[in-house]
Amino acid sequence: MCGITGILHFDREKKADSFILKKMTDSILHRGPDGEGHYLHNNVALGHRRLSIIDLNTGDQPMFNEDNSLSLVFNGEIYNYIELREELKRTGSCFKTDSDTEVIIKAYEKWGIKCQNRFNGMWAFALWDNNKQQLLLSRDRIGEKPLHYTIYENSLIFGSEIKSILAYGVPKIPNNELLEIYLSLGYIPAPYTFYKNIHKLKAGHCLIIGRNDIKERQYWDLPEIDEENMISNKKEVYEKFEDLFTDSVRLRMRSDVPYGAFLSGGLDSSSIVASMSEISSFPVETFTIGFKEKMYDERYLAKLVADKFNTNHHEFIVESQSFNESLDNIAFHFDEPFGDSSAIPTGYVSKFAASKVKMVLTGDGGDEVLSGYTTYQHEKFASQFKRLPSFVCNKFPYFLELISSPIKGSLKYYLNRARVVSFSSNMDFQSRYLYKTPGIDLAAIKQMTKDEKVYPIEEYLSDFMKKCTYKDPFYQLMYLNFKLSLPDDMLTKVDRMSMAYSLETRTPFLDFRLIEYMVNVHKDIKMKKYERKTVLRNSLGHKLPKQLLTASKKGFVVPLLDWFKEDSFSKKLYKLKESLPMVNEEIFGRIANTNTKEDKELGNFIWKLFVLNKIIN
C-alpha cells in the first residue's frame, strides 16, 4: 500500500523536472512514510511513497526489469503473487525479489496488458515501457485503490490523490456543474472530480498513453447474468461461498508486518474475524469504534465476537467534540467534497488501529456481495407491493401519513419510514433510488442549485444505468452498488481515511472470484423472504454468537442528529448558512427545523453542506 505520482510530457524534448516530481510525491507522504523513490528519463517521471507490508528489504520502487526498459510504481497488493510467481518461473521468468511488485513486471513481460486479468488484488499502478514509448495506468477491478489524472499544458499528470496533481501546478477550478450530483449522492462519481479537467480513472479500466494518443480500455466488468436461470441450489451456494470466502481471507492475511481487523459487531466483519482466528496461529488484533449514544453503539456485539474468538480487542469512543478535527481531516485527505459522515468513525478507527498494526482486514463489500442493504428488502417489497390493486398502492402511503400525524417519538419515525417505502414502491427503480438517496427531497436540492448550470442527477443516473443489462430492479440495484456507490463512496472513504494514518486495509468480500460467483446467485437465495444475508447466515453464521444473527442492521453511522441538537452547534449552523448563499433562508429553516424532530433526520445532509463549505471557502 503506497502512493504514486507521475508526469509524461507529450513534447519528448521537454525534460521532466525532479523538483516538481518530489513536490508531488511529498504531498502524499501519509500514504507511504517508509520510503520514497523517483525515476526520471527524458520526458517521463515516476514517483513513489512506500508503506512496507510485503518484502520489506527488496521491494523498493520504482522497480525495473533486467534491462531497465520497464519501470513500475505500484500502490496496492497482488494477493496471488506467490502463485503467479511460480507460474511465471515455470515459463522461464527469473526473480530478484520476493515482492508482488516484481510479479507485475514479469506478468507484463509475459502477457502484456492482459496481465491485469491475472491479478487477484487491489491496485493502481503506472508502468512505463521505454521500448514502446508507452505508459500504462491501471486501476483494480472494483476500485479499491484510487488513480487521478489530467492533461495540462501538453502533459499527462497523475497521482493517487488530487493533491499530487495540484502540487504540479494544475489550477484548482471547481466544477459547479456537479453540485446537484454531490448534494444528491454525497460524493463525486468517477470519471469526474470536483475540479475541471481532473479525472478519476474508473474501476476496471486502464489508460494506454502512447506518443500521440490516449486510449481508455475496460478490461473487466460485472458478468452478464441470465435472470431466468440464476444459481438456485442453496446447498451449493452456501458451500461455494464459504470456500471462496475462506480462501480470500487466507490470501489477504499474507503479510510481513503485524495486522488485525476492524470489528464493528456486524455480520460481515465478525465473519472475517472468525475466519482469521481459524487460520492464524496467534490471537487476532481487533479494533472497534463506539459512541456514547446507545442507539448507535455496537461495542457490546463486537465484544461478544472478540471474546468468542479470543482476540486482543481494542475499543475507542468517538464524541461530538471530534467534529472540527474530523472536518479538517476529511477536507485535506479527500481534496474534494465527500459527504458520507461514516468517514468520521472510519478515520478514528484507522488512527487507533495504526498505533498497533500496519494492516487490517475489513468487512467492506459484504453488503454488495450479499445484497445485504435494507434497500434490497425495499426492492423485494416493491415488486410484491405492485401486485396489489392500484387503488391500494396509491392510497396506502397517505393512510400511513394520516395515522402518524398525531403520533410522536420513535413510532412516528417508523411509520414515516413505512410511508416512504410504500410511496416509493409505486415508482420505477431510478426514481425510487433518487427518492431515498439524498436525505432531503430533491426539489430542495434543485432550489439550492437553481443559479448554477448543473448536470441533473436524474440525467446522470439515467446515463449511468444505460450500460446495465440487468432487468429486475433487485439486480439493477446490485449493479448500481457495485459500479457506483462501492468504488466512489465506500471504498474511497476507507482508502482516504486509512491511508491518512498509513494503515493498509484489505477487503476479503471483494475477491473478484467471490463477486463473479455471487452476482449469478438468485435473489431468493441471497434473501430468503426478507432475511438479510441469508447466504452468510447459513454458511459462516453457525460460528458466530447468536445475538449477532438477530441484531438489527445499524451500519457505520454517526449520531449527527444528536450532535447537531447540542447548543455548541447552533453557531456552526448559522455560520454555514452565511458561507453558502445557495442555502437560502427558507431552505435553511426547513433543514434546521426538520432536524430537531424525531421523524426525519437530516444530519447527514447537513454534514454534506459542512464538507462542501470547507472545500470551497
Image: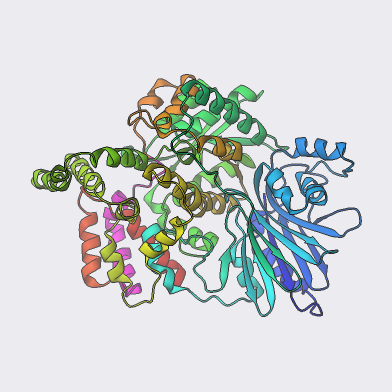
In the rendered structure, the answer to whether residue 260 lies left or right of residue 583 reads right
State yes or no: residue 569 in magenta. Answer: yes
* Residue 123 at x, y percent in the picture: 66, 50
**Depth order, front residue of 359/97:** 97
In the rendered structure, the answer to whether residue 608 lies left or right of residue 280 reads left
State yes or no: residue 243 in magenta. Answer: no
The residue drawn where x is 38% and y is 43% is: 472
Vertical position of residue 274 compared to residue 610: above or below: above
* Residue 48 at x, y percent in the picture: 73, 59
Q: How many marks?
A: 0
Task: Confirm whether residue 182 shows in the render.
Answer: yes
In the rendered structure, the answer to whether residue 270 lies left or right of residue 424 reads right
Highlighted magenta segment, given as a residue range? 555-582
The residue drawn where x is 60% and y is 62% is: 161
Task: Confirm whether residue 617 shows in the render.
Answer: no
Vertical position of residue 563 compared to residue 81: above or below: below
Extreme residue toward the right, this view: 67
Vertical position of residue 247 compared to residue 147: above or below: above
**Depth order, front residue of 603/349:** 603
Question: What predominant SS class does the magenta segment belong to?
Answer: helix
* Residue 458 at x, y percent in the picture: 36, 62
Extreme residue toward the front, this view: 228
* Residue 294 at x, y percent in the picture: 32, 37
The residue drawn where x is 53% and y is 44% is: 224
User: In which quadrant will I find the C terminus?
Assistant: bottom left
Image quadrant assignment for residue 254: top right
Image quadrant assignment for residue 45: bottom right
Looking at the picture, the colour scheme in use is rainbow
